[in-house]
Amino acid sequence: MKLPVYLNYAATSNQKFDTTIDELCAYLKENNSTNTNRSVNALGDLGALFDARQVLADFFHAPDPAHVIFTSNATMALNMVLHGLLKPGDHVLTTMVEHNAVTRPLHLLETERNVAVTHLVCAKDGSFDPEQIETAIRGETKVLVMTHASNVLGTILPIKECFDKAKKHGIITVLDSAQTAGFLPLDMKEQSIDILTFTGHKSLMGLSGIGGFVLGKDIEKKIDPWLTGGTGSASHLLTQPEFLPDKFEPGTLNMLGIISLKSAVTEIQRLGLDRILMHERLLTKRFLDGVKGMPVEILGCQDAERSVPVVSLVSPQIDSGELAQRLADEFQIVTRSGLHCAPLAHETAGSLKTGAVRFSFGWETTLAEVDYALSALEKILSQ
């Protein structure tokens, strides 16, 4: 086993696929200047861009490759979607385990645009009862936006049941898939997802700085462009083009990020999501079994079958930040401590004042690394 041991996959994947690295190097050797739609010699980039849209459309079961919109990350995607959808007087439903990528844009819309926001409660372990949705819906409810799984508690939310209920009332459904894309299967039609936002650098194994959103059929007509600018198309217009994907893709695209995402998702499909899921759940179960009996509180549902590969814990005898630092300094184990950009999830779990140390696992994590982390944790907590 090599050191350091990286157990912070919920923040970002550590080691990219060899095939992805090879593709990126080959691209840079052949092309380091062209800009899609803005150069006579950019046909190669246009082909790579179309291929990437096709791969993502197939992966998420989107209605059309043109409905795959690339942005810099999931936060940008969520801002573009929420600001483009919600108008003064609208009402939006969300949950108490959301990442700040959802809660901060909604708070801004609430304070500056008079958009009403309802945060639906979750149990202390992060589980969510879909029946709440029916009672929370108002005449002016326009959007239900939810994370698929908490980045703190790990708990997977029942998005299909929730979105089915919302769509019966004509409510637009928005999914934040940052913690599940590349770990759980996602099917926009089957799971009643109108808009799916994603980030490329976590379980999708792409580079940082790439993400986006995928639109269901005709949903683009309900979203105003929030970010506008040059597209290399319809340049005679002072307004943003209405056709996809240009309506939501102003400015220069991150071709390296896009190529990395196309390559990595292709490799994920070759490996098979079932295989990835089985491996990462085995790791999570191993860690959960090993940490039980230690002087810690485990946050979340504590069931690997109902969670993403994330385990957060709090010790009454050592500060979370100190524990994470000692794991790094004494054992070269990389975790993450604090509130994880999700204060509402910590409020739900009762850890808002203490924060937590989060261990998260990925495809490259080994059982030996999990066992090493458990041994290190036990040594620190026994002192």
Image (cartoon, helix red, strand yellow):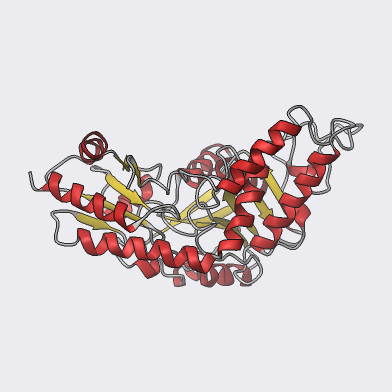
Residue 42: quarter of image: top right
Q: Position of residue 235 (x, y in %)?
A: 89, 32
- Residue placed at 73% from the left, 45% from the top? 224
Residue 224 lies, with reference to residue 288, above or below; the image says: above
Residue 284: quarter of image: bottom left
Tell me, yes or no, if residue 347 can be seen here. Answer: yes
Left or right: where does residue 59 sit relative to residue 345? right
- Number of disc labels: 0
Q: Which of the two residues, 383 or 298, is positioned nearer the viewer here? A: 383
Q: Position of residue 64 (x, y in %)?
A: 77, 59
Tell me, yes or no, if residue 86 can be seen here. Answer: no
Left or right: where does residue 203 sit relative to residue 338? right
- Residue placed at 38% from the left, 45% from the top? 8
Residue at far left of view? 383
Q: Position of residue 175 (x, y in %)?
A: 56, 57
Q: Quadrant of the C terminus?
A: top left
Residue 252 lies, with reference to residue 364, above or below; the image says: above
Residue at far top of view? 33
- Residue placed at 39% from the left, 62% from the top? 155
Q: Which of the two residues, 154 or 80, is positioned nearer the viewer here? A: 154
Residue 80 lies, with reference to residue 132, above or below; the image says: above
Q: Which of the two residues, 296 or 122, is positioned nearer the viewer here? A: 296
Q: Position of residue 28 (x, y in %)?
A: 69, 32
- Residue placed at 66% from the left, 50% from the top? 262
Residue at far front of view? 1
